[in-house]
Image (cartoon, helix red, strand yellow):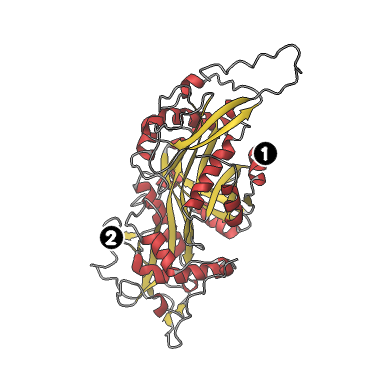
Amino acid sequence: MAAAAPPPPTVPAELNMDLPTSYPLFTRIRLAAKPDVPVIHKMIHQMAVFERLSDQCSATEPSLAATLFSKNNPFESFTVFLIEASTTPFPSSSSTGVNHKFIPIHKTLNLDLPISDPESEKFTSSTMEDDVIVAGFVLFFPNYSTFLAKPGFYIEDLFVRESYRRKGLGKMLLSAVAKQAVAMGYGRVEWVVLDWNVNAIKFYEQMGADVMQEWRVCRLTGDALQGYATASGTDGLDLI
Amino acid sequence: MATAATPPPTTAASELNMYIPTNQPLLTRIRLAANPDVPAIHKMIYQMAAFQRLADQCFSTESSLSTTLFSKDNHFESFTVFLIEVSTKSFPSSSAAHHPEFTPIHKTLNVHPPVSDPEPETFKSSTMEDEVFVAGFVLFFPNYTMSVAKPGFYIQDLFVRKSYRRMGLGKMLLAVVARQAVEMGYGRVEWVVLDWNTNAIKFYEEMGAYVVKEWMVYRLISDGLQAFAATNDLEK
């Protein structure tokens, strides 16, 4: 956090020294936009390190900007929510960062300890509001259920920066996606988890999600996918 | 629990069986589906549900399919359906099947063993071309991989009608989605398989795909979804 948390209140000598203190953290979930690409890019790399896949991370700021933010059609295509945090309240009348397609969601958390965020300078919000730091993101997009003949949402990535973990921010992001699905009359929300990520598995089970135990994801990529390009690998399919 | 939508009516009693003897050519065509194809797609979805023993969980109707799949003409940017159609005669060269974003793909197969289709009239192509019948479909849509900052395709459904199985039609549908992904510069094509379906896994591995071993799929649906969405007292 750029600004130090307010110092704990001084306690007069005659009062009980076991008074609890709590540190409010003001959070906001909003739609991301092109100006947020630099912080999203940094978080993607941190996420890749966490997943032990950083050698496979080739996203750049221009490629993210071109593929995620070339059109303003959130919820119809790839969509990113950011969760931002501040030690000072967000102004209630602020319209900064508001995309008319989504009204930001606020929640005040009461923490036992102040946040210690050594990288806060690198994650200041693109809205340029004082003391607002990006703490995480969720990327999701519509999928389709044939049996329901309804869209749903698929959550591709959910990430909370290390300094902000275990405070409910991931759950807030998931909940925001679920609310959006329900508001749009969608049928399902789906995602995948790495089978060694015991914290995440416990979290998902507690929130009432079902694991599709027998499902395995199949993937065609790299050279194997390139083999299907026109004029090769298609067993004599003719073009009219 | 809402009752499942009633399945589409069974074929008229007078429907003639279509029979193609061994070693006769079967001409196939893959094209983009459109709104007029909804009735055939709807029937195939019910056949697919029956095959998966999930017919009581199938609630799709012609109108819900039409609204969700074909209300906008934004192929490949959203939910997309390819149909594979068959005929014993050549497809006309100027065709109702053409779409500005996708030129139909043709292949001629030699039938072995013979094909017997008991419901050709039910699956007559919406293009109204003579003797052209819908044999299967694939439904897919864009997904996104953050680490490479590229879209891909996710294949939700792949279905070939019973009379036309084991001739390579499913493989053709998969190959065409893969080709479309490559042409659009996309990075991956993905789908799911049941872990006990060794035949399917073998088929997919032979096509060059691999099982992503560490991933487990989670899902929030119906009551669980409603309940979770209602929690957390998030303020606006």
* Image: A206 above or below A150: above
* Image: B130 above or below B165: below
Front in this rendered view, residue A87 or A211: A87
In the rendering, at what x and y percent does residue A89 appear? 51, 27
Please tell me in which quadrant of the rendered image residue B26 appears: bottom left
Front in this rendered view, residue A65 or B128: A65
Distance from Cα at disc 2 to Cα at disc 1: 48 Å
**With A203 as the anchor, is B72 left or right in this view?**
left
| Outermost residue toward the left in this view | B94
Quarter that holds the N terminus of chain B: bottom right
Please tell me in which quadrant of the rendered image residue B140 appears: bottom left
Foreground: disc 2 or disc 1: 1
Mark 2 crowd level (few <14, some 14–19, many ≥20, 10 Å Cα): few
Q: What residue is shown with label 2? A: B99
Chain of the residue displaying label 2: B
Type of amino acid under label 1: Val
Give the residue displayed 65% in from the left and 25% down from the top. A22
Q: Secondary structure at mark 1?
A: helix
Type of amino acid under label 2: His
In the rendering, at what x and y percent does residue A211 appear? 63, 50
In the rendering, at what x and y percent does residue B39 appear? 41, 71
Numbered mark located on residue A198 in the image: 1
